[in-house]
């Protein structure tokens, strides 16, 4: 949880739109290009496969031209500029010693990761770390965040949950705001209704979209199973090290919230 709320700042700060516009790209295309850039100039199908819960429309209507506008390396550099500028809000709240201690905990975790079946994590782990210590810390946290995301996608596939079905569950269980899901994932009303009907057939939702007790239990099972798959990564630092890392990085999230950076998460 702590790693995710620190990582996600890159998607919601105003600097993102500014930096991506400087490359000639506006709107959601900047998100897709900057996040997929570590994998190279991949086609739309790879973005759909790895990001998973976005509709084909969301990707294919925005991605054309992004690799002509800028190379993956340029997109990655822009992403780091977004983070560096945004983290100026955090600098007074995190000392050099705290950043170094956080790196001493996250670095061995990243080094211990096995990346088979983890494309977003593997590609982010291959990125040269920036010289700014706080941005470098953010990138290491990003590797771990994407590793968990890759593991979760694998689990969704194993449980035969389609991209729109897992999103419907996220919204119905209160884990994802409906308005954001509609605006960013862009599933049609028919596709949303089909996913709801499919979940109702499983007994996980009512036909009106309300989660059933069985559905809530299954949703928690998927999260618990993802946590179980991710637990070995923390062996390098142990439970105490993981807890200490959380203490060290949460001021980043708290400073971003205090600055009013993304009030939707208040």
Image (cartoon, grey):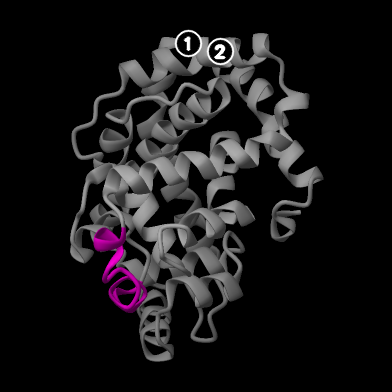
Q: Which residues are magenta?
A: 55-69
Q: From the image, which quarter does the C terminus lie in?
A: bottom right
Residue at x-position 32% and y-position 42%: 151
Q: From the image, which quarter does the N terminus lie in?
A: top right
Residue at x-position 59% and y-position 46%: 9
Confirm whether residue 235 shows in the render: no
- The question of residue 65 being in magenta is answered with yes
**SS of the residue under disc 1:** loop
Residue at x-position 43% and y-position 58%: 31
**CA–CA distance in space, label 2 to label 1:** 5 Å
Locate residue 244, reporting x and y percent.
63, 16
- In the orientation shown, which residue stands out farthest toward the right? 258
Locate residue 36, reporting x and y percent.
31, 51
Residue contact at pointers 2 and 1, CB within 8 angstroms: yes
Q: Which residue is mark 1?
A: 237
Number of numbered discs on residues:
2
Quadrant in which residue 200 is drawn: bottom left
Viewer-closest of 260 and 222: 260
Residue 241's disc number:
2
């Amino acid at each position: 949880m702590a790693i995710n709320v620190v990582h996600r700042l890159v998607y919601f700060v105003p600097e993102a739109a500014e930096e991506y516009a400087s490359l000639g790209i506006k709107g959601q295309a900047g998100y897709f290009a900057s996040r997929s850039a570590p994998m190279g100039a991949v086609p739309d199908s790879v973005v759909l496969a790895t990001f998973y819960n976005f509709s084909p429309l969301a990707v294919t209507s925005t991605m054309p031209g992004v690799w002509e506008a800028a190379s993956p390396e340029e997109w990655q550099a822009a992403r780091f500029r977004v983070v560096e500028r945004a983290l100026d809000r955090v600098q007074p709240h995190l000392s050099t010693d705290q950043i170094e201690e956080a790196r001493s905990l996250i670095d061995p975790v990243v080094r211990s990761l096995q990346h088979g079946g983890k494309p977003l994590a593997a590609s982010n782990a291959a990125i040269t770390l920036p010289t700014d210590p706080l941005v470098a810390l953010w990138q290491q946290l990003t590797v771990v965040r994407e590793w968990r995301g890759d593991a979760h996608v694998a689990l969704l596939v194993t449980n035969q949950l389609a991209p729109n079905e897992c999103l419907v569950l996220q919204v119905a269980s209160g884990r994802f705001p409906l308005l954001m899901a509609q605006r960013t994932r862009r599933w049609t009303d028919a596709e949303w209704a089909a996913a709801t009907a499919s979940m109702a057939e499983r007994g996980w939702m009512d036909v009106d979209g309300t989660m059933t007790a069985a559905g809530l239990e299954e949703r928690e099972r998927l999260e618990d199973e993802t946590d179980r798959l991710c637990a070995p990564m923390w062996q390098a630092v142990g439970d105490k090290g993981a807890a200490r890392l959380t203490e060290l990085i949460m001021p980043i999230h708290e400073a971003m919230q205090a600055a009013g950076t993304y009030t939707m998460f208040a």
